Amino acid sequence: MIRKLLLLNGIAILFAVYHHSIYWAITAINFWGHRFVSNATPQSLFSPNLFSIFLRITDQIAGVAVPAFLFVSGFLYGFSLNHQSIRQSYRFLQKRIIYLLIPYIIWSSITVVFRLMEGDSYSLTKLARVFLLGEADGPFYYVPLIIQLILLSPFLFRAVKEFPLVAVGIGFLLQFLSGITWYFKILNVSLPQSLNFLNLFKGGYLLSHLLWFIAGLSLFIYREKITSFLKNHRWWILFLIAFFVIFGQIEFQLLINASGNDWINSQSSLITKWLYSLLLLAYVIMGKNIFLSSNIEVLGANSYGIYLSHVIVIEICARLIYHVLPFLLGQTVILLGILVFMGITIPLLMMHLSRKFPIKPIYSYLWG
């Protein structure tokens, strides 16, 4: 099971790079048309067609990356914390947090320098938010989130062990309550006074993502019972996955119709979050030989370093294509392929070169 979940990390980092490459594909479609078509007007993704539905569905599924990371982390931290006291647990967790923090601080700083070169400015408050809340760039929120979960993990582990259904139920409820506020935000509607209590659930990512970490802990503690249950209900799981993919696209269209946006990030949708949970459960009971690949294992082992560095890499590549090879901007599938390929291979190449560096700690400082 551990190897299977580590492979899931490799699949997840591929999905993460694809998900963030979609942003540049949409930018090319809606704002860079003048670079590859004479007298072009922005092509809208507002109306559903075969092409836009392809982008929507693949982006929706690729968004499972962070839930997958949290799910795998929950299982692995359950494995590490088993039979340890609270004090012993925190000695181990302290090392893990340092392992995560140093590369995070370095890549956040690199991102800040990159933005300064683009003309952005940073106040002390904004800098504090960059490092404390992961606001250097969109994906960086994951690191403060996983650190919060690591700090809570000894208590979560014991809660799941003693009261598994209660722990999972609370995680589900918190995700549901935090998800409701997203719909009001997308529609630019204020919460009615009777729902003002939901404001308590809309800040940060901890409450909306806690369930997947708890699910990973639960799988470690009750692996045989859970896998047996899932296998007995595998056809229902597959049916629900298909249902939520279809219903998620209907919801997507209804929301962009109501909001007037050409595109929305559906990761925060409750329908999409439930889809992610089902995808993770389906992966648990997949055959052992599915996705077994040494290349994916390499990605899984290096997923943290790729995750921190790929956003800048794909942005630089997209901007280079804009200036040097603008005709590729109109070939969305090819553009996505290039960005994903570069977003994976360039960080791996940088990691390889870092290993050759004469100062040994350089690699762990940069990549974890």
Image: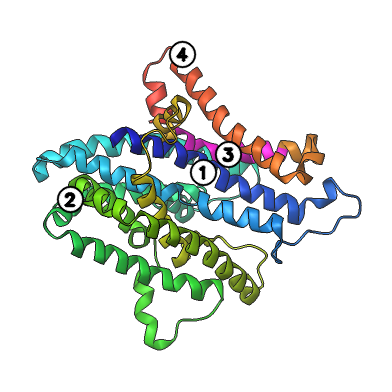
Res 205 → quadrant: bottom left
Percent x, y of residue 291: 45, 35
Q: Nearer the viewer, mark 2 or mark 1?
A: 1
Question: Residue 146 or 61: which is nearer the viewer?
Answer: 61
* Foreground disc of the pair 2, 3: 2
Residue 356 is labelled as: 4
| Residue located 24% across and 50% down the image | 228
Q: Residue at x 68, y 48 (%)?
A: 25
The foreground one among 166 and 233 is 233
**Residue 67 seen in render:** yes
Q: Position of residue 184 (x, y in %)?
A: 50, 76
Is residue 335 rendered magenta in the image? no
Instruction: Name the kind of residue labelled 2 in the image.
Output: Phe
The Cα–Cα distance between marks 4 and 2, rounded to whole angstroms, is 39 Å
Q: Earlier in the sequence, mark 1 or mark 3?
A: 1
Name the element at disc 1. helix
Q: Earlier in the sequence, mark 4 or mark 2?
A: 2
Residues at badges 3 and 4 in contact (C-beta under 8 Å)? Answer: no
Range drawn in magenta: 305-319
Residue in the image at 20% along x and 46% along y: 224
Which residue is identified by label 1?
15
* Secondary structure of residue under mark 3: helix
Q: Amino acid at mark 3?
A: Ile
Q: Are marks 2 and 1 in contact (CB under 8 Å)?
A: no
Looking at the rendered structure, the kind of residue marked 1 is: Phe
Classed neighbour count for the residue bearing mark 2: other residues with Cα under 10 Å, few (<14), some (14–19), many (≥20): many
Q: Which residue is mark 2?
A: 157
The number of numbered badges drawn on the structure is 4
